[in-house]
Amino acid sequence: MPISKCPPKSQPPWKEWDQKAQKNGLRHQVHAVNGDRYVGEWKDNMKHGKGTQIWKKKGTIYEGDWKFGKRDGYGTLSRPDKEKGKYRKVYSGWWKGDKKSGYGIQFYGPNEYYEGEWCSDQRCGWGRMYYSNGDIYEGQWWNDKPDGEGMQRLRLHSSGS
């Protein structure tokens, strides 16, 4: 009586492709359908660890820490400056759950920036705002506005003689 061996069961090709597409560990570059790009570490198909995200639509770049697909930890956000033809730093500091949280510096213009504490994308706690006209506010913030104790230093404007 002939003995026949059962051929080993092979996985359908789609299953193998799906396993290869799972993102875990370091990936060189992953392109999204909309043109966005990410280079960095992954865990369970989510950005997790150190990485750089480039959003194609606005050209914005985030370099820093990720946790389960969201900016979390220290990172820097930059946007293209069309006048100068290079990138301009917009925010450098701490993030939590994809929002500015903790200590950070937000740059509003060449001579205008805020340096201090953030909560859920808003200035809160203690911080210092440098205005383009030379004025400085240092003190407490709440809901993105000066609130509580603080000091406003006004730049003296001299009238030419």
Image (tube, grey):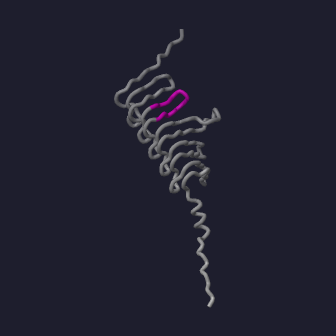
Magenta segment: does it hold 106? yes
Q: Position of residue 118 (x, y in %)?
A: 42, 37
Span highlighted in magenta in the image = 104-115
Residue at the location (57% across, 38% down)? 79
Q: Position of residue 18 (x, y in %)?
A: 58, 63
Q: Is residue 108 above or below residue 152?
A: below
Question: Splitting the image into 4 quarters, where does residue 137 fall?
Answer: top left
Task: Give the number of callouts.
Answer: 0
Residue at the location (34% across, 30% down)? 148
Most extreme residue toward the left, as rendered? Answer: 148
Q: Position of residue 158 (x, y in %)?
A: 50, 13
Q: Is residue 35 above or below residue 89?
A: below
Most extreme residue toward the top, as rendered? Answer: 161
Q: Position of residue 55 (x, y in %)?
A: 58, 46
Magenta segment: does it hold 31? no
Q: Nearer the viewer, residue 88 or 19?
A: 19
Residue at the location (39% across, 28% down)? 139
Which quadrant: the C terminus?
A: top right
The overriding secondary structure of the stretch rendered in magenta is strand
Residue at the location (44% across, 20% down)? 154
Position of 84 with respect to 126 (left or right) is right
Most extreme residue toward the bottom, as rendered? Answer: 1
Which quadrant: the N terminus?
A: bottom right
